[in-house]
Image: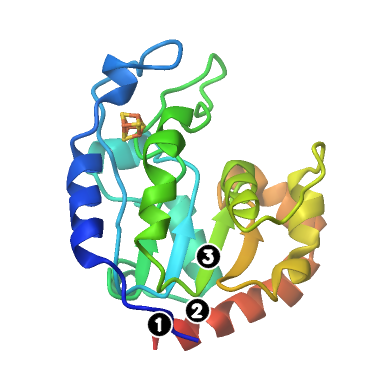
């Protein structure tokens, strides 16, 4: 069901302010961001599908385009969307938990999303996007944030596999919430070990996305 029209002016103001954000350089919680901020997101007052992801990787940091990498190819396949539809702001919004590439850890993996971002922006941004009908929560940071936002309890030690396996538990929320693992190659072994993900979850995900982006 559609909700009240989004506050477009508010959303535009938030997008403009977040695009120029330098909190993680000038007022960081702990160590500053190791490079100049480059916030990457796609806000929308029309999109009924929201990708609530983790944080841009280095490739997106360079290109400025979210999911411009093999993870994006896999995510688009999961959603059943062409690149044109995926990047159509009237159909899909992209709101990662950290807008800037957070840098690498000592094992060359990506650091977690900067917590400053959630504290500064997310509550206001999601309040300004009431039209969202489906939120794809990608990774534990997004899952924990959005479940808390909707007052859905989550065991402290609940892991990704357990939460994604319980995806049907969130089918009755408005907007609907679907938890997903990150579409990175790092999760290929997990995907192979859990064939129900492709057999059960993905067909329903594609049907919902097709309905809401038609
Ligand atoms: S990660 Fe978020 S809070 Fe930090 S500088 Fe980028 S936009 Fe600002």
In the displayed structure, would residue 11 be above or below residue 210? above
Compared across the picture, whether 38 is left or right of 199 comes to left
Look at the numbered discs 3 and 1 and tell me whether their residues touch, using CB distance below 8 Å. no
Q: Residue at x 82, y 37 (%)?
A: 157
Q: Earlier in the sequence, mark 3 or mark 1?
A: 3
Compared across the picture, whether 114 is left or right of 85 comes to right
Position in image of residue 192 (x %, y %)? 75, 57
Q: Nearer the viewer, mark 3 or mark 1?
A: 3
- For the residue pair 99 and 72, the one nearer the viewer reads as 99
Position in image of residue 170 (x %, y %)? 71, 67
Res. 194 mark = none
Position in image of residue 71 (x %, y %)? 48, 52
Res. 135 mark = 3
Q: Quadrant of residue 32?
A: top left
In the displayed structure, would residue 24 be above or below residue 147? above
Q: Kindly report the distance in space between the C-alpha atoms of the residues bearing marks 2 and 3.
A: 10 Å
Res. 213 mark = 1
């Amino acid at each position: 069901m559609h909700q009240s029209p989004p506050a477009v002016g508010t959303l535009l103001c938030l997008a403009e302010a977040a695009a120029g954000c330098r909190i993680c350089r000038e007022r960081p919680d702990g160590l500053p961001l190791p490079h100049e901020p480059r916030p990457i997101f796609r806000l929308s007052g029309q999109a009924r599908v929201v990708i609530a992801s983790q944080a841009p990787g280095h490739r997106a940091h360079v290109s400025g385009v979210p999911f411009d990498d093999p993870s994006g190819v896999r995510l688009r396949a999961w959603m059943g969307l062409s690149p044109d539809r995926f990047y159509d702001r009237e159909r899909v919004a992209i709101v990662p938990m950290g807008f800037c590439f957070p840098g690498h850890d000592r094992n060359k993996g990506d650091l977690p999303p900067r917590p400053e971002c959630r504290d500064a922006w997310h509550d206001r941004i999601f309040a300004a996007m009431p039209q969202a009908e489906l939120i794809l929560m990608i990774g534990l940071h997004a899952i924990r944030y959005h479940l808390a936002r909707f007052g859905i309890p989550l065991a402290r030690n609940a892991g990704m596999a357990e939460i994604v396996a319980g995806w049907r538990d969130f089918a009755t929320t408005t907007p609907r919430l679907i938890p997903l693992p990150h579409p990175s190659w790092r999760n290929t072994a997990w995907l192979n070990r859990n064939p129900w993900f492709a057999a059960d979850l993905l067909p329903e995900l594609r049907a919902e996305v097709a309905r809401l982006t038609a």
